[in-house]
Image (cartoon, rainbow, N blue to C red):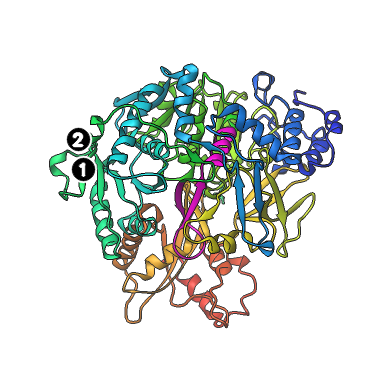
Amino acid sequence: NNLPTTASHFRHVDAMVPQPSAAAAKLSQLKAVVLGEAPASEDDEVVVPSHEFSRQALVPSTQKYLEMYKSSIEDPAKFWSSIASSEFYWKQRWGDQVYSENLDARKGNIKIEWFKSGITNVCYNCLDRNIDAGLGDKIAIYWESNEPGFDATLTYSELLHRVCQLANYLKSIGVGKGDAVVVYLPMLMELPITMLACARIGAVHSVVFAGFSAESLAQRIVDCKPKVVITCNAVKRGPKTIHLKDIVDAALIESANNRISVDVCLTYENQSAQNRESTKWEKGRDVWWEDVVPKFPTSCDVEWVDAEDPLFLLYTSGSTGKPKGVLHTTGGYMVYAATTFKYAFDYKDSDVYWCTADCGWITGHSYVTYGPMLNGATVVVFEGAPNYPDPGRCWDIVDKYKVTIFYTAPTLYVTRYSRRSLRVLGSVGEPINPTSCRWFFNVVGGSSCPISDTWWQTETGGFMITPLPGAWPQKPGSATFPFFGVQPVIVDEKGVELDGECNGYLCVKSSWPGAFRTLYGDHERYETTYFKPFPGYYFTGDGCRRDKDGYHWLTGRVDDVINVSGHRIGTAEVESALVFHPHCAEAAVVGVEHEVKGQSIYAFVTPVEGISYSDELRKSLILTVRKQIGAFAAPDKIHWAPGLPKTRSGKIMRRILRKIASRQLDELGDTSTLADPGVVDQLIELADD
Ligand code: WTA
């Protein structure tokens, strides 16, 4: 058998590393199944990396992983400072303490700091440092437009020039260190250029996914008060043209109503979607990118910043209330994004890397822009939709650029094509379905292409639980083991750490460099949401099971957050959008399993008195959600609800709604505590109306 290691290797690893060594002891008993048929239990299916792959891998064996993991946990300061000093440029080294932390709210404010007093710049490390090392002529970006046949490239030197021109322009309008810049751009090259330009001058970018509505954009602008918003006139997504500038205009009116005015709206002219003449324009505020930016010098001094100065804000959904501004700082995030990228994808200089995520989400921040570029990688940036003009588009792009590392949402895997350039596959956002995983491994990868099922979050900055291809036998559907420096723990509802085989709430003990430092303007909410539920730990909001071999299986959110095609949405947000509709009295939203999207949005709606159910009302409710949040948050199903199942104290019992939504009607459980148990029968009757 070609297990990369044998049980005897693990005797050298002491009990410091509880999960992996427990797993390792059992490894020799595991039966490898590589032939497509599923074993009796998913826990017993193991996919072993090939010898060829393991031999060339950065972490070539389980033993090596365990050694590195152990040192990262025993002495995090030493582990991370050795990476930070050997692989990055620091204008000035950090102070005596590599990191300091308090994750226990009972002992005072939650605080996480890494490399404090170290002076550096992320843009410099992505561009100048790599160019100095000889990568100036290497392709940094292959850009592929929505329309097949339109593309562009930028070398690292060219990218630096573009970044500097924009950085100089931003400085000329008074944007400086610590200022927020809101970015509402599609996947044009200008999006990573903008992120890097902000980083270069110490400005804090807040990219808003260009699928969010004017309302949502306005909410974010009002929260972080940018001097400038950067957008483009329009974008084509598949066959549709979306007029982004109109959305920004509406958002700026809404912000002004909230007394937040933005001085400049820098607009890139995306000629393939719309020309200048037909773009609405507000003189004095709106500026065409092409008219100003190219006139600025192609070099720009770097603003050296402290490792703990903010790099970016990214709004994300929680289980309640308005979106939270997750704040990441400079030094720790830089080291963590780069190091996770390098190891989880087993990155080599010759790789061509493509991540299909949009820079409007964390995956695009850490694994389109920063992680790859810190490693000097060649990155494919794709403007379009994966199924346009046909479902083979992704694989055409893989072929065209000879992509070797492909990182995507697992739902993309259902398109069954095969491309041989691929070396490593990654997936994120939801557990990968074992059937597609098996198929992908056997057919596409020719049983030699490892798949990294990476588990992480906006808050974590980078991968937390992920296979290292080559090091670990994988189990399809399991994110396997923690990345270096990460100590996942599974706790019960009382916050007691569980050992061995268990199922519970996923928390993390101790900080890691990429951890978010606060919620912008609301440190209290940061503490309450993430650190108070289980004192002493960071609480992820996810459920997790650890199997008999120590592998981690994510079981989904335990709060009211859902993941739809990789987009994170709070059910409370969708509910407040629905009740915004004048004919909606009450709404309750749950996620249901969906074959393609992972989860889909299912809404129970009670109309106001006197209003009857109609298709028209259904459509107009959906339209309201599109307007309030964005098209990606539109419910797939509106279920009419004369009443909602509530406890006597008025709390909606979502457990029951979830069962009704997924038609598991024989699993409704105890309904006797409901104020009106009859409500449930009514709902079941109306299920298919
Ligand atoms: C879910 C995306 C299962 C999880 C990077 C988490 C996953 C949320 C996986 C974060 C995975 C992410 N397996 N579930 N490999 N990766 N999730 O902030 O519920 O958009 O809490 O970050 O996605 O979503 P976010």
Q: Which residues are magenta?
A: 312-340
Q: Are marks 2 and 1 in contact (CB under 8 Å)?
A: yes
Name the image quarter holding residue 18.
top right
Q: Which residue is mark 2?
A: 291
The crowd level at tag 2 (other Cα within 10 Å; few <14, some 14-19, many 20+) is few
- Above or below 353: residue 641: below
Q: Residue at x 74, y 30 (%)?
A: 62
Q: Is residue 620 above or below residue 378?
A: below
Looking at the image, residue 201 sits to the left or right of residue 276; the answer is right
Going 75% across and 33% down the picture, which residue do you hit?
66
The local crowd at label 1, few if under 14, some if 14 to 19, many if 20 or more residues have their Cα within 10 Å, is some
Residue 530 lies, in percent from the top left, at 60, 59
Q: Amino acid at mark 2?
A: Asp
User: What amino acid is at disc 1?
Assistant: Val
Mark yes or no: residue 485 visible.
yes
Residue at the location (38% across, 47% down)?
Answer: 209
Q: Is residue 478 visible?
A: no
Q: Nearer the viewer, residue 582 or 162?
A: 162
Residue drawn at (30%, 25%) of the image: 149
Question: Image quadrant for the C terminus?
Answer: bottom left
Decide whether residue 549 is among the magenta residues. Answer: no
Residue behind label 1 places its C-beta within 8 angstroms of ligand 1:
no
Q: Nearer the viewer, residue 612 or 546?
A: 546
Dot 1 corresponds to which residue? 287
Secondary structure beneath dot 2 equals helix
